[in-house]
Amino acid sequence: MKAPENCPNCGADVPRGARACPECGADEHTGWSEEAETPGNLGIPDESFNYEEYVKREFGGEAAPDEKRRRFWRMVGFIVLLCIALPLGYWFITGLLAGNSR
Protein backbone atom coordinates (compact mmCIF):
# COMPACT_ATOMS: atom_id res chain seq x y z
CA MET A 1 0.00 0.00 0.00
CA LYS A 2 1.24 3.49 -0.86
CA ALA A 3 1.97 5.87 2.03
CA PRO A 4 -0.42 8.82 2.34
CA GLU A 5 0.83 12.41 2.03
CA ASN A 6 -0.35 13.17 5.56
CA CYS A 7 -0.51 10.65 8.38
CA PRO A 8 -4.15 9.83 9.17
CA ASN A 9 -3.10 9.11 12.75
CA CYS A 10 -1.25 12.33 13.73
CA GLY A 11 -1.51 14.58 10.65
CA ALA A 12 2.26 14.90 10.08
CA ASP A 13 3.71 15.09 6.57
CA VAL A 14 4.85 11.65 5.39
CA PRO A 15 7.81 11.63 2.97
CA ARG A 16 7.25 9.92 -0.40
CA GLY A 17 8.16 6.24 -0.22
CA ALA A 18 8.19 6.18 3.59
CA ARG A 19 7.18 2.91 5.22
CA ALA A 20 6.03 4.59 8.43
CA CYS A 21 5.14 8.03 9.74
CA PRO A 22 8.28 9.79 11.01
CA GLU A 23 6.30 11.41 13.86
CA CYS A 24 4.09 8.71 15.36
CA GLY A 25 5.32 5.52 13.67
CA ALA A 26 1.97 4.60 12.11
CA ASP A 27 2.25 2.31 9.08
CA GLU A 28 -0.09 0.23 6.95
CA HIS A 29 -0.50 -2.28 9.79
CA THR A 30 -1.28 0.27 12.49
CA GLY A 31 -3.07 3.16 10.88
CA TRP A 32 -2.93 3.58 7.08
CA SER A 33 -5.00 0.72 5.73
CA GLU A 34 -8.68 -0.06 6.23
CA GLU A 35 -7.72 -3.33 7.99
CA ALA A 36 -5.43 -1.61 10.49
CA GLU A 37 -6.11 -2.34 14.13
CA THR A 38 -6.40 0.68 16.36
CA PRO A 39 -6.17 0.31 20.10
CA GLY A 40 -9.16 1.55 22.06
CA ASN A 41 -7.38 3.81 24.50
CA LEU A 42 -3.79 4.93 24.04
CA GLY A 43 -3.75 6.82 27.33
CA ILE A 44 -3.01 10.10 25.58
CA PRO A 45 -4.47 13.08 27.43
CA ASP A 46 -7.04 15.19 25.64
CA GLU A 47 -6.88 18.93 25.01
CA SER A 48 -8.39 19.81 28.39
CA PHE A 49 -5.61 17.99 30.32
CA ASN A 50 -4.37 20.11 33.24
CA TYR A 51 -0.74 19.30 34.02
CA GLU A 52 -0.64 21.28 37.26
CA GLU A 53 -3.68 19.42 38.59
CA TYR A 54 -2.14 16.08 37.55
CA VAL A 55 1.13 16.82 39.38
CA LYS A 56 -0.76 17.89 42.49
CA ARG A 57 -2.93 14.76 42.43
CA GLU A 58 -0.09 12.31 41.66
CA PHE A 59 2.72 13.79 43.73
CA GLY A 60 0.88 15.67 46.44
CA GLY A 61 2.41 19.01 45.58
CA GLU A 62 2.82 21.53 42.87
CA ALA A 63 5.17 21.56 39.91
CA ALA A 64 8.49 23.23 40.59
CA PRO A 65 8.15 26.96 39.97
CA ASP A 66 10.15 28.46 37.14
CA GLU A 67 12.09 30.63 39.58
CA LYS A 68 13.47 27.59 41.37
CA ARG A 69 14.61 26.13 38.06
CA ARG A 70 16.23 29.40 37.03
CA ARG A 71 18.00 29.70 40.36
CA PHE A 72 19.28 26.12 40.05
CA TRP A 73 20.66 26.66 36.53
CA ARG A 74 22.21 29.99 37.51
CA MET A 75 24.03 28.21 40.32
CA VAL A 76 25.17 25.44 37.97
CA GLY A 77 26.46 28.07 35.51
CA PHE A 78 28.27 29.90 38.29
CA ILE A 79 29.97 26.70 39.45
CA VAL A 80 31.02 25.85 35.89
CA LEU A 81 32.47 29.34 35.44
CA LEU A 82 34.38 28.98 38.71
CA CYS A 83 35.75 25.63 37.58
CA ILE A 84 37.07 27.31 34.44
CA ALA A 85 38.13 30.66 35.90
CA LEU A 86 40.05 29.42 38.94
CA PRO A 87 42.51 27.19 37.04
CA LEU A 88 42.98 29.90 34.38
CA GLY A 89 43.56 32.52 37.05
CA TYR A 90 46.05 30.30 38.82
CA TRP A 91 47.86 29.62 35.55
CA PHE A 92 47.92 33.34 34.73
CA ILE A 93 49.18 34.42 38.19
CA THR A 94 51.87 31.74 38.36
CA GLY A 95 52.97 32.71 34.86
CA LEU A 96 53.29 36.36 35.90
CA LEU A 97 55.22 35.45 39.04
CA ALA A 98 57.54 33.16 37.12
CA GLY A 99 58.12 35.94 34.57
CA ASN A 100 58.95 38.51 37.30
CA SER A 101 61.47 36.28 39.05
CA ARG A 102 63.98 36.45 36.16
Image (spheres, helix red, strand yellow):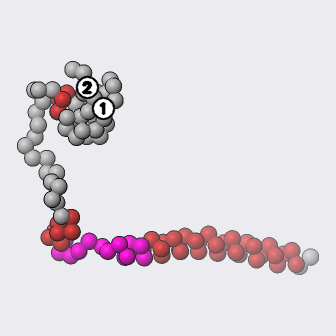
Q: Secondary structure at mark 2?
A: loop
Q: Nearer the viewer, residue 71 or 94?
A: 71
Task: Say if the magenta span includes residue 70.
Answer: yes
Q: Could you tell me if residue 49 is visible in this image? A: yes
Task: Say if the magenta span includes residue 88.
Answer: no
Tag 1 near tag 2, CB within 8 Å: yes
On the image, the x and y values in percent for residue 93 come to 76, 77
Q: Which residues are magenta?
A: 59-71
Whole-Å distance between the Cαs marked 1 and 2?
Answer: 7 Å
Residue furthest to the top = 1
Res 15 → quadrant: top left
Instruction: Report the residue marked by disc 1.
Output: 14
Res 102 → quadrant: bottom right
Instruction: Report the residue marked by disc 2.
Output: 3
Q: Could you tell me if residue 55 is visible in this image? A: no
Is residue 73 rendered to the left or right of residue 24?
right
